[in-house]
Amino acid sequence: MRTGLNAKLGNWLVVGVLMVLMSLASASDVQAQDLTNAEVYWLKHMREEEKLARDVYTVLYEKWHSRIFKNIYLSEQTHMDAIKTLLDRYGIPDPATGNDYGLFTEESELQGLYDEQINDGSFSLVDALNVGVFIEKTDIEDLNTAISVSTHKDIVTVYSNLLAGSNNHLEAFESNLARK
């Protein structure tokens, strides 16, 4: 009797697991179809904007050897990875794929901004810290806009976490500037 009960429980467990997996797969298919053009735009834009921050901070760290740039460029890589997870989840091509440091795909404005920030941050450490303030303020503004047009909880959650990180980065840059 026990063997029969265990077999039935085992079968129900297998069926239950399969049903959960199928519902997860179909839920992600439905979500991918439900993204608005604005959501797709902001996911791509934020991927490249986080890349811009990482790339600029990497160059500024190499120039000035200030720990703040190293700590924050590592954090920006984490931000990039979080956006990449969303791009993958929704089947959106990654605009950063194959682009080396300092190169951007669809965002010609970002290419110009990158070049400008590298130039502006090369004169002094204070100038470099001001570049960090500018990038983080831009990131905060863009994340707030992206949150306002997003309808998917997972996207809003990632953007909210990135926003908290950018606020921390801004505070760190401003704190370093105050000491200079």
Image (cartoon, rainbow, N blue to C red):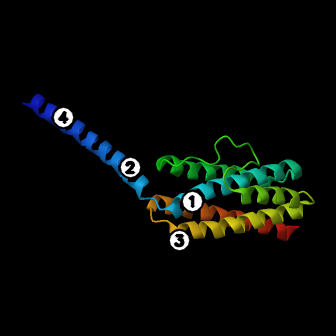
- Residue type, numbered disc 4: Asn
Q: How busy is the neighbourhood of tag 2: few (under 14 within 10 Å), some, or many (20 plus)? A: some
Q: Can residue 70 be seen in this snapshot?
A: no
Which sits earlier in the primary sequence, circle 2 or circle 3? Answer: 2
Which sits earlier in the primary sequence, circle 4 or circle 2? Answer: 4
Question: In this orientation, which residue lies closer to the viewer: 159 or 90?
Answer: 90
Q: What element carries label 4?
A: helix
Place residue 99 in its image quadrant: top right
Place residue 113 in its image quadrant: bottom right
- In the drawing, does residue 41 fall left or right of residue 3? right
Q: Is residue 175 above or below residue 31?
A: below
Observer-side mark, 3 or 4, equals 3
Q: How busy is the neighbourhood of tag 4: few (under 14 within 10 Å), some, or many (20 plus)? A: few
Disc 4 to disc 1: CB gap under 8 Å: no
Observer-side mark, 4 or 1, equals 1
Q: Name the residue under label 4.
A: 11
Q: Mark 2 points at which residue?
A: 29
Observer-side mark, 2 or 3, equals 2
Which sits earlier in the primary sequence, circle 1 or circle 3? Answer: 1
Q: Name the residue under label 3.
A: 148
Q: Distance between the residues labelled 1 and 3?
A: 13 Å
Disc 4 to disc 2: CB gap under 8 Å: no
Q: How far apart are marks 2 and 3 (CA)?
A: 23 Å
- Residue type, numbered disc 1: Tyr
- Residue type, numbered disc 2: Asp
Disc 1 to disc 3: CB gap under 8 Å: no
Q: Name the residue under label 1.
A: 41
